[in-house]
Amino acid sequence: MKNSRHLDEHLIDKVERAFAEVEYPGDDDLTDSSYGEEPRALVNDFRGKTDWKQLDVAFLNQAPDGWGTALSFFSDNALRFYLPAYIIADIRGDLDSYDPVARLCSSLTPQGERKKIAKMWGGGTMGSRARACFAKFSPQQLSAVVAYLRWKLDARAGHDPTIEQALENYWLEHDVVP
């Protein structure tokens, strides 16, 4: 167990270093969606939260407004900024809300990547949307995400088809940092 805990701390350090220089996207770039209550609630909850390291787990688990679905509604820039808070909370076993794996992997599986997005939300497919979002990640950030997904897969006894397929279909080909 001690080695596992050491690995977890190493992974947390890797995530923190990879995302350390990401700038707060600004209050006007927290979500791309304006449909429904959750995007408005997300903006209200995250407005002015300029340091992801200061967000406590209780906040992450409930935001926005008790739904715990912020990862679903973040803009690409806001996701890149806040993602490390969610990943680290998950590694520490404190995340009870939306699993980061869903945002990082579901749209990169053969089943998810071909799903169409309504024109009112920009059109295209879920896969093209996810790839455009993750293309903004630096090589170090991509590597940290791959390390997290491998850790998550290991935590699930080495079997999770969603993670396995997303790693194979996208993440591993972008993991160029040793």
Image (cartoon, grey):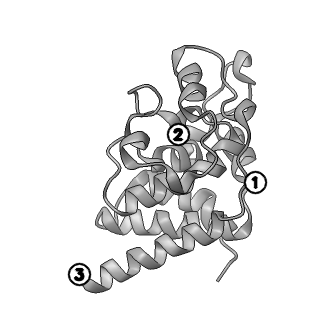
Give the SS element for disc 1.
Answer: loop
Q: Which amino acid is tagged 2?
A: Leu
Residue, disc 3:
1
The mark nearer the N terminus, 3 or 1, is 3
Q: Give the numbered dot on residue 135.
A: 1
* Alpha carbon separation for disc pair 3 and 1: 35 Å
Q: Which amino acid is tagged 1?
A: Ala
Locate residue 110, reporting x and y percent: 56, 45
Locate residue 2, reporting x and y percent: 26, 84
Give the SS element for disc 2.
Answer: helix
The mark nearer the N terminus, 2 or 1, is 2
* Alpha carbon separation for disc pair 2 and 1: 17 Å
The residue shown at (44%, 25%) is 65
Q: Is residue 60 left or right of 30 when viewed as pictured? A: left
Residue, disc 2:
71
Q: Is residue 86 left or right of 23 when viewed as pictured? A: left
Q: Which amino acid is tagged 3?
A: Met
The residue shown at (38%, 27%) is 66
Q: Quadrant of the N terminus?
A: bottom left
Q: Is the residue marked by circle 1 packed among few (<14), some (14-19), or many (20+) residues within 10 Å?
A: few
Locate residue 89, reporting x and y percent: 40, 56
Q: Is residue 73 left or right of 137 when viewed as pictured? A: left
Q: Is the residue marked by circle 3 packed among few (<14), some (14-19), or many (20+) residues within 10 Å?
A: few
Marks 2 and 1 close (CB-CB < 8 Å): no
Kindly tell me whether residue 170 is visible in this rendering.
Answer: yes
Among the 4 quarters of the image, the one containing residue 172: bottom right
Which is in the foreground here, disc 3 or disc 1?
A: 3
Give the SS element for disc 3.
Answer: loop
The residue shown at (62%, 72%) is 17
Among the 4 quarters of the image, the one containing residue 61: top left
